Amino acid sequence: MSLHPQGIALLEMMASLGGPLIEESTPTEYRAFQATRVIPPTEDIHEVRNVSAGGVPCRLYRPNANKNLGLLVYYHGGGWVIGSLDGYDASCRALANRMGHAVLSVDYRLAPEHKYPAAVEDALCSLRWAYDNADELGINPNRIAVGGDSAGGNLAAIVSQQRPVPLVFQLLIYPATDMTQSRESQVENAAGPILTAPVMKWFIDHYMPENSDMKAELASPLFSPDNLLKGAPPALIITAQYDPLRDEGEEYGRRLIANGVTTSMVRYHGMFHAFFGMLGLLDDADTAHSLAASMTAKALNG
């Protein structure tokens, strides 16, 4: 299937607005530009408040006053270099409202100021804090899921392998699972749209220290030993046809299945990297949010 007509129209509109190329910008420059493109929240929700999760800034979304909600700990995308709580506000509101459970959005440290494994450390720290402070959050510590998109999907997969607390589900949206960037879809979709080969290299070069082991379990969950995958929580893996990360996400799903983990994989044909966050602009973004929310809620409902 070719690019979806809605996607083509959206990409043309985005191109007409202009803006710097990521790979030709410094992280500081691109973050500043990205901040000007944040869309104000349009979806009401019962409660939104900022919290410090063991020193990691986070934002809690509660869809109702129930003090025994399940919790989705969500790690945003942005190649471990860009991305923010504000930039993911709309998605987190939508997920919380559609699930009927809380979302904790994690503002983990970004590279290059804080290189690998700082983001992983913050992902684990915030998850432990949420479990230990369930009463403060009004959630059930035995009903916690993790999720994320792109770089955030990488972090969600890693914490699902490490499992510092009991987890009931992992929501992986076009997750980056292979730092070696050696899958066929990396070549097939090297020109994007949205995520290109030069942009992916820019992200990894900023995130990974020189001479890093690109197959280390805290960097590339695809290469982790079987014992870390066995016993991992059930998973939903969402991928997009025109995404360089497509194949590594789906291959990771096959590894989970091979290790006895209940895993659903859904590829959105005609879609591209970052489509999940384009609520109200792409029908498939709304459909994917509904799918993610329903499957995560089913796990959180117990």
Image (spheres, helix red, strand yellow):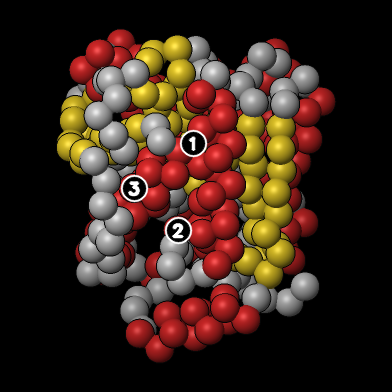
Dot 2: few (<14), some (14–19), or many (≥20) neighbours within 10 Å? Answer: many
**Secondary structure of the residue carrying numbered label 2:** helix
For the residues labelled 3 and 1, the Cα–Cα distance comes to 14 Å
In the picture shown, does residue 32 fall above or below 172? below
Q: Position of residue 171 (x, y in %)?
A: 55, 37
Q: CA distance from mark 2 to mark 1?
A: 14 Å
Q: Which residue is mark 2?
A: 277
Q: Amino acid at mark 2?
A: Gly
The amino acid marked with disc number 1 is: Gly
Q: Is tag 3's residue or tag 2's residue first in the polypeptide sequence?
A: 3
The percent position of residue 249, horizontal first and vertical second, equals: 67, 44
Q: Is residue 1 above or below residue 174?
A: below
Residue located at (53% from left, 49% from top) = 290
Crowding at dot 1, Cα within 10 Å, few <14 / some 14-19 / many 20+, comes out as many
Q: Earlier in the sequence, mark 2 or mark 1?
A: 1
Kindly give the residue lying farthest to the right in the view shown: 258
Image coords of residue 160 (percent x, y): 55, 23
Residue 129 spot, x, y in % from top left? 30, 17
Question: Which label belongs to residue 223?
Answer: none
Check disc 1 and report the residue beneath it.
147
- Image quarter hosting the N terminus: bottom right
**Residue under the point 23% across and 63% down:** 40
Q: Quadrant of residue 53?
A: top left
Q: Give the left or right position of residue 182, taking residue 296 as reference.
A: right
Front of the two marks 3 and 1: 3
Q: CA distance from mark 3 to mark 2?
A: 12 Å
Where disc 3 sits, the SS reads: helix
Residue 93 circle label: 3
Closer to the N terminus: mark 3 or mark 1? Answer: 3
Badge 3: how crowded within 10 Å, few (<14), some, or many (20+)? Answer: many
